[in-house]
């Protein structure tokens, strides 16, 4: 009985114990992820329902805002989720916001934005040149106000996913497991919520989407290690989603709905070149680009590590 009690105490997500076998620690981190995620989403849902009631609507009786308003409320509500995660992080893990990845090096956020813009261009251009994506010009009536609102929405959405994955999961795993293990498990956690959006996709597109999700997750993780914070990953994640959906008007991770966009770009047919309904994140050409970037990031990390080691030797 004592062993069972000790086992439960060790893997409990409500303490910051680390003295246990690695496999138990990995289980503990996964439990922390799901408890934090469920807790944050529960609070977020309560806030959304509360806003409906405050505006004289009863969602329990089907009285809801229009779809665009609900989408905006949901995205802006991610700020609540981030706040709840930070609170749980401090309460149960007894760690600082810096240890979650929010360091003072905010400048790397803009490096992430620049990298994300270039990376997306490198993926979109070759797919468009094959004719798998068609460019139909600029929309006549562009809702500038909504575009600006969506910037804030995607900043929060990208940050929320990175807080959960590169923040909670990766930061905890890096304390006790190897770098490859930490990155691999973080990738699995990142991919899992996206799988439901692949329903109806062909096996080829679904497999390519999973491969691409793993690759982009690795890139996010390597950026987090390179800059010792999650700011760059947040910047890349948010700008990728914003440009893809609100500027180019293309599908984002299987979500065909868009509130507004600047350019009228659409997939031609459904194939592994354009990713079908899932979007270019399921494109085989995107996989090639992402794989190349993973290689570049690994070489950069090795180069940086070598310079650091040489600098330490010179000092000693």
Image: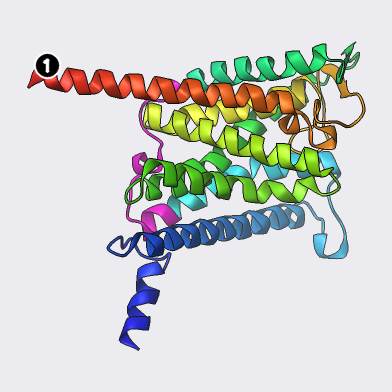
**Vertical position of residue 54 compared to residue 126: above or below:** below
**Vertical position of residue 2 compared to residue 64: above or below:** below
Q: State the residue in front, 27 or 116.
A: 27
What percent of the width, then of the height, locates residue 223?
A: 46, 28
- Is 97 part of what is drawn in magenta? yes
Please state the extent of the stretch shown in magenta in the rendering. Answer: 88-108
Q: State the residue in front, 84 or 263.
A: 263
Q: In which image quadrant can residue 69 be found?
A: top right
Location of the N terminus by quadrant is bottom left
Q: Which residue is mark 1?
A: 314
What percent of the width, then of the height, locates residue 97?
A: 38, 43
Under circle 1, the secondary element is helix
Residue 137 in sight in this render = yes
What percent of the width, then of the height, locates residue 304?
A: 32, 20
Q: Residue sitting at 26 percent across and 18 percent down? A: 307
Label 1: few (<14), some or many (≥20) within 10 Å?
few
**Vertical position of residue 174 compared to residue 62: above or below:** above
Residue 254 in sight in this render = no
**Vertical position of residue 202 compared to residue 270: above or below:** below
> 291 left or right of 208?
left
Q: Residue sitting at 78 percent across and 18 percent down? A: 127
Q: In which image quadrant can residue 253 be found?
A: top right
Location of the C terminus by quadrant is top left
């Amino acid at each position: 009985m004592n062993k069972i009690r000790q086992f439960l105490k060790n893997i409990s997500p409500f303490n910051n114990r680390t003295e246990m076998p690695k496999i138990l620690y990995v289980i503990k981190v996964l439990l922390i992820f799901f408890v934090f995620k469920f807790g944050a989403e529960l609070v977020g849902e309560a806030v959304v329902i509360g806003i409906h009631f405050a505006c004289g609507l009863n969602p329990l009786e089907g009285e809801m805002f229009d779809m665009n308003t609900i989408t905006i409320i949901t995205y802006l509500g991610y700020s609540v989720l981030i706040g709840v995660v930070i609170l749980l992080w401090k309460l149960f893990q007894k760690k600082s916001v810096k240890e979650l990845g929010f360091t003072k090096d905010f400048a790397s956020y803009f490096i992430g934005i620049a990298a994300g813009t270039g990376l997306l261009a490198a993926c979109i251009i070759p797919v468009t040149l094959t004719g798998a994506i068609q460019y139909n010009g600029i929309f006549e009536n562009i809702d500038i106000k909504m575009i600006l609102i969506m910037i804030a929405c995607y900043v929060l959405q990208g940050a929320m996913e990175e807080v959960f994955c590169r923040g909670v999961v990766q930061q905890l795993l890096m304390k006790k497991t190897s770098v490859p293990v930490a990155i691999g498990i973080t990738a699995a956690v990142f991919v899992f919520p996206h799988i439901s959006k692949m329903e109806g996709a062909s096996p080829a597109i679904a497999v390519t989407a999973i491969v691409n999700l793993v690759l982009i997750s690795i890139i996010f993780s390597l950026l987090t290690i390179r800059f010792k914070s999650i700011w760059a990953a947040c910047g890349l994640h948010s700008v990728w989603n914003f440009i893809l959906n609100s500027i180019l008007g293309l599908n984002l991770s299987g979500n065909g709905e868009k509130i507004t966009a600047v350019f009228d770009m659409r997939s031609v047919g459904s194939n592994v070149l354009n990713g079908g309904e899932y979007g270019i994140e399921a494109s085989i050409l995107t996989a090639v680009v992402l794989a190349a970037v993973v290689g570049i990031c690994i070489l950069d990390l090795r180069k940086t590590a070598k310079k650091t080691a040489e600098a330490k030797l010179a000092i000693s």
